[in-house]
Amino acid sequence: MDKKFKVVHIKWSLWQKNIHVFWSVFFILFSFTCYVEAISPSKQKEAEEWLKKASSTDSIELKIEYYSKVIALDPKLAILPYYNRGFIHKQLQRFAKAACNDFYKAGILFLEQNNKNQALSCVEQIKKTDPSSPLINELMEQINP
């Protein structure tokens, strides 16, 4: 009887120690999440400003730069910058691989919003840019799993 009680007591005390570790990790992660959420609105506002600048400039190089800044600052606003930056590269007939990557990323973001039609338009843009791109099949597999 005494041995059985000790085994149960040891298992219980290990569980108690582990539950404290669990809660400690949980609160650290929760605190970090709250911190990230707290700084997000300022980055979102800055990203929106860069997006406005991109739409108001006539310089193609500046558009590419501003779209890149939006993508780096706020992934939630990245659909339009990815698509537009890819379209600019396609129109200039340079950086075909970069254009395809941008269209692919825009397509993935459209899918996250359950917008298959727009994702399919990204597939079409990839096909027009580089018909042999492996990203065509990768995006189609995401659209039709």
Image (cartoon, rainbow, N blue to C red):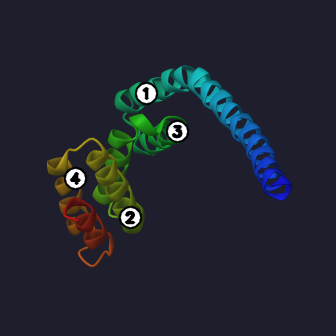
| Dot placed on the residue nearer the N-terminal end, 4 or 3 | 3
Q: Secondary structure at mark 4?
A: helix
Where residue 105 appears, as percent x and y from the top left, is 37, 54
Q: Secondary structure at mark 3?
A: helix
Closer mark to the observer between disc 4 and disc 2: 4
**Dot 1 corresponds to which residue?**
53
The circle on residue 94 is: 2
Q: Residue at x 14, y 49 (%)?
A: 117
Give the spatial CA distance, label 4 vs label 3.
23 Å
10 sits left or right of 30 in the view: right
**What is the three-letter code of the residue carrying label 3?**
Lys
Residue extending furthest toward the bottom: 132
Give the spatial CA distance, label 4 vs label 2.
22 Å
Closer mark to the observer between disc 4 and disc 3: 4
In this rendering, the answer to whether 50 lies above or below 126 is: above
Give the spatial CA distance, label 3 vs label 2.
20 Å
120 sits left or right of 28 in the view: left
- Callout 1–callout 3 Cβ contact below 8 Å: no
| Dot placed on the residue nearer the N-terminal end, 1 or 3 | 1
The circle on residue 119 is: 4
Few, some or many residues within 10 Å of mark 1 (<14, 14–19, 20+): some
**What is the three-letter code of the residue carrying label 1?**
Lys
Closer mark to the observer between disc 1 and disc 3: 3
- Callout 2–callout 1 Cβ contact below 8 Å: no
- Callout 4–callout 3 Cβ contact below 8 Å: no
Question: Picture quarter containing residue 18?
Answer: top right
**Dot 3 corresponds to which residue?**
69
| Dot placed on the residue nearer the N-terminal end, 2 or 1 | 1
In this rendering, the answer to whether 89 lies above or below 109 is: below
Q: Residue at x 41, y 39 (%)?
A: 59
